[in-house]
Structure formats: C-alpha cells, structure tokens
Amino acid sequence: MDKIIKTIAENGAFRAYVLDSSQTVRVAQEKHQTQASSTVALGRTLIASQILAANEKGPTKLTLKVLGQSSIGAIITVADSQGRVKGYVQNPGVDIKKTATGEVLVGPFVGQGEFLVITDYGTGTPYHSMTPLISGEIGEDLAFYLTESQQTPSAVGLNVLLDQEDKVQVAGGFLLQVLPGAKEEDIARFEKRIESMPSISSLLASEDHIEALLAAIYGDEPYKRLAEEELRFECDCSKERFMNALASLPQADLEEMKEQDKGAEIICQFCQTTYNFDENDLEELIRDKS
Ligand SMILES: [Zn+2]
C-alpha cells in the first residue's frame, strides 16, 4: 500500500512530506499501457497531485493539468483529500531514451506550456491557479508553482524508476517547505542540506526509500511524524455517472444510437473501464426526455 508521511521539524521552521507512490504509478501504467517516457511523465504528475492534495485541509478535489505542447501532450490528474488519485496522458506511446545511459527522457517531450491547478472545495466555485512550465520535468514545475502561487519557498523531488522491461520499479518523492517564522540561519542550514542531498533517483533506489528520504532531509535535526496516510490510484467512475452524461445529449442523438448502433459504448478516460449501454438503457433515457 502506498503512503505519505507528514513531518515537521521540532523547532517548527520546516515541514516535509515523503511519499511512496509505487503502486499508484504501477496501476496507472497497467491501465493506460504507457511506454517509458509517458509512464514517467504521467507518474510524476500523479505524485505531484498527491503532494498538492496532501497540502489541502478538509474535503477537496484537486485537478492538475500539465498542458505541454510537445509529443506527450496534456497530462490530466485528479486527486482528493482521501488519498485517491486518477489520471491519464494524452499520448501514452512516447518512449525515448538516451542511447548512452538508457535514461528516460521526459522534459523535452512535455515541452513548454502551463501547469494549471484547479482546486474545488465543494463550494461550487473552483479556484484556478497557473504558472508556466519551467522544464517539463514536473518536479521543478511543481516547486516553481508552489513558490510562485503559494509564496512558500519549497523544494520538491519526485521520480519514477523503471526496471529493465520498463515496468515501474519504484515511484515517490518529497516536499520540503519553509514555515513562517523560520530564522535566516535555519533556512541557510536547510538549503545547504538540500544542495548536498543525494539525487532523488538514488534515494528512491534505496531499500526503504521513505526512511532514506527522511534521513536525507533532516540529517540529525530532530523532527516529529504528524501523520501517515494511505495513497492509491482509484477512479470514481460508474455506469450511473456516464448514464447521466448520456442523458444530457439531444433526444435525436439518443434515438440514432438506439436505432442505428443498437447501443452505446463509453470508455472512461481516467481508468479505461468500458461501460456498455444497450437499447433498453437508451430507451429509458429517451423516455425520460419526452
Ligand atoms: Zn474511470
């Protein structure tokens, strides 16, 4: 089971989240049959939305759209404050690696564009906030977004490591934020530690990457564990939900589907589940309209 651990430095100057998102990204890869670059890009975006959702208090639905203009296309994810996340990538088939090292390339194939966050507190008026993509590597884009839009100095590390067959080996990350009231010397000390931190990839490759991340972030600085919460890939789609979507179509379209196609098929973009509607379902919708 994936998890996020929320921590705070004992002196109150910083807080940090560390995440294991391996199963989340594995499920996303299986559902969408993504190739290497698309797997890593979608995975990093899923982790970014888990971090953003963890930052919210109370029931919240948070949509993250990475709207890049290169071959991977748009990446759309939705996370909630109960640890659920779902998402898809417009082009699941991008697979580009450096010949020399086998490193999976992401940023250039996400490209330039926008990092758009839509936060819905259930009040009926979602809040939109947007920053430009800095590198298309997602982690840097998230750090820039947090620093710009929330005015909170933030360090972010997140990644997805693949095995020899390009299956998800491990995925996760961290968020470190300076809290109001942090002293200059606290900030300088932490900046130094972040600079000397091993790469996120080598930390994720550790046997217990959650503990490796915490050790790298805090060193011998005392900290408290505030909470540990489960994370998972889960889609909230249902036949009833798509039935409601069909109900909004004009009657003539529903009649055409019933007479000519003898039914309708809808595939959920977020989880690839197929829902079939037969002539009786369509008849019911037509009856409700007249
Ligand atoms: Zn679904």
Image: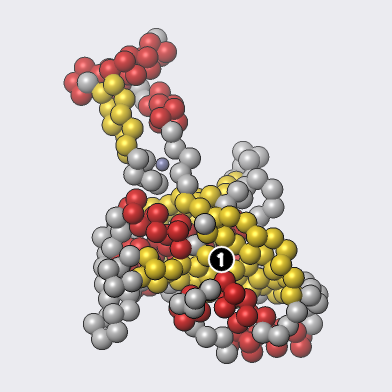
* Residue 204 vertical position relative to residue 245 in the rendered view, above or below: below
User: Residue 164, can we see it?
Assistant: yes
Residue sitting farthest toward the front: 207
Image height check: is 127 above or below 242? below
**Label 1 crowd (10 A; few <14 / some 14-19 / many >=20):** many
Find residue 64 and report its horizontal and vertical position in percent: 50, 55
Identified at 58% across, 55% down, the residue is 230
- 236, above or below 100, in the image: above
Q: Is residue 134 visible?
A: no
Identify the residue under disc 1.
19
Please state the horizontal and vertical placement of residue 42, each as a whole percent of the image.
40, 61
Residue found at x 63% / y 67%: 17
Please tell me which residue is depicted at 57% across the width and 60% down the height of the picture. 3
The quarter of the image holding the C terminus is top left
Q: Would you identify the image quadrant in which residue 43 lies? A: bottom left
- Answer with the quadrant where ligand 1 appears in the image: top left
Q: Secondary structure at mark 1?
A: strand
Mark 1: amino acid: Leu
Number of numbered discs present? 1
- Residue 110 falls in image quadrant: bottom left
Check the image and name the residue furthest to the left. 260
Q: Position of residue 103 (x, y in %)?
A: 32, 79
In this rendering, position of residue 171 left or right of residue 5: left
Q: Is 220 on the left-hand or right-hand side of 20?
A: right
